[in-house]
Image (cartoon, helix red, strand yellow):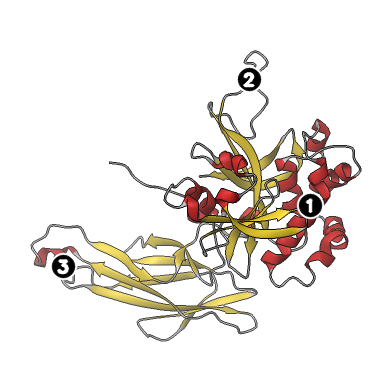
Amino acid sequence: MARLEMNIWELYPRREEITLQSVERLSEGVGVRLRLNTCIREFSHFLYTIDNMSPKRSTDGQIIVRFEDPYKPVEQHATVYVKAVSKTGISSKPHVINIHYYSREFWHRSGLTHPAQLIVESTDTFLSSSRVEDWTTQYITREERSYAQKKWGSLILNAKSDYEAAKALAKSLIDDLEQFRGIPSDEMGKLSPFEQYERVMAGKDHVWCGNLSAIFSHACNALGIPCRCIEMIYPWRQLPWPINKPDPEEGYQLLLADGHGTTEVFSESYNDWIWIDLSFHILGAYLGEVGPLNLFEFYFFLNNPNRADALRVIEYDPTTKTEKLIPVTEFQKKRSLSVFKRDQQFQYGVTLWPLKGSHPEWLSPQYF
């Protein structure tokens, strides 16, 4: 028997009005302690009612639901209605959590020996394990925000959405840095993303995927567009991250997949993550008409023969300054997409600048 376990929802949080941080058994009696989270701005309290009783407030997100008769031989249930309320009085829509309790006596009536069960049977809320900010927070100074605003602020001023703003920024950086593509020196690893940008634009160095993703991500976050870097590399030996240079006596590293650095922006308008790759001039991807996709979706469908032919990418041409949505089979850099093969590891984390060596340091890295 095999078990499917994944951390996709940990890696891809969305803005949810209310989420379940945890569901815990009570230490005494039968019941649960619900702990709630919310993403609404200027949060004040949760307003809730259990089985249409008088409304109550919870400022810490805790709601306790009890079943007074643990031996009752019938199904028992409780319905929780809850709203998140801001300090300005704005509230979310009502969310529902249905909890059912089945005692041993209930099962025994059907001739079944079965332990008592307390089940969250239905809810329109989700278990929360991370926030968008957990993956996009970077150490951006006031000076860097000012720099980004002066450098690229006019590009995104009239953008129709945050995704369109991110695309405009990506195109500008591709235009600036394409002529400097190559192998960066060790000096680049000592600089912050904007310092890397200035060094390269002065003609003193080169950029590859890791630099492009770092500069783009830093610029996005400095301009208020949540963005994160994703590192990809699969060493045969499971070395700690970042991957250090091999021991001189070993001579080389053995990798099962080529390395690559890419990015995702979080779009408030789509309430989802969107993959953008400056190295490949990709401004987004779609499966047929569905999209724009995040990186995991693109990777999964690309490696599924029944889905790959339906993939389309938005390709940007820096020579003509145009973008077009084309089938991935017609993508000019299609061979480069081999980095997304099945034998690949993806690492998500919050980067610390300046870079150390050729790879960023990571806080709380997560994989799929």
Which residue of the protein is positioned furthest toward the right in this rendering?
202
Q: Nearer the viewer, residue 126 or 75?
A: 126
Residue 104 image point, x, y percent: 17, 63
Q: Which mark is residue 319?
A: 1
Kindly state the secondary structure of the residue where label 1 is placed: loop
Q: Residue at x 39, y 60 (%)?
A: 24
Regarding residue 139, the answer to whether it shows in the image is no
Q: Nearer the viewer, mark 2 or mark 1?
A: 1
Q: Which mark is residue 250?
A: none
Separation of disc 1 and disc 3 at Cα? 72 Å
Point out the tag, 1 or 3, that comes first from the N-terminus.
Answer: 3
Quadrant in the picture for residue 130: bottom right
Residue 261 image point, x, y percent: 66, 43
Regarding residue 100, the answer to whether it shows in the image is yes
Q: Residue at x 45, y 84 (%)?
A: 55
Quarter occupied by the N terminus: top left
Q: Residue at x 81, y 47 (%)?
A: 177
Residue 273 image point, x, y percent: 59, 59
**Is 253 left or right of 3, judged from the image as shown?**
right
Residue 62 image point, x, y percent: 47, 69
Point out the tag, 2 or 1, that comes first from the N-terminus.
Answer: 2
Query: How many numbered tags mark residues here?
Result: 3
> Which residue corresponds to mark 3?
106
Label 1 amino acid? Thr
Q: Which mark is residue 252?
A: 2
Kindly state the secondary structure of the residue where label 3 is placed: helix
Q: Nearer the viewer, residue 297 or 333?
A: 333
Separation of disc 3 and disc 2 at Cα? 65 Å
Q: Nearer the viewer, residue 320 or 124?
A: 320
Label 2 amino acid? Tyr
Quadrant in the picture for residue 86: bottom right
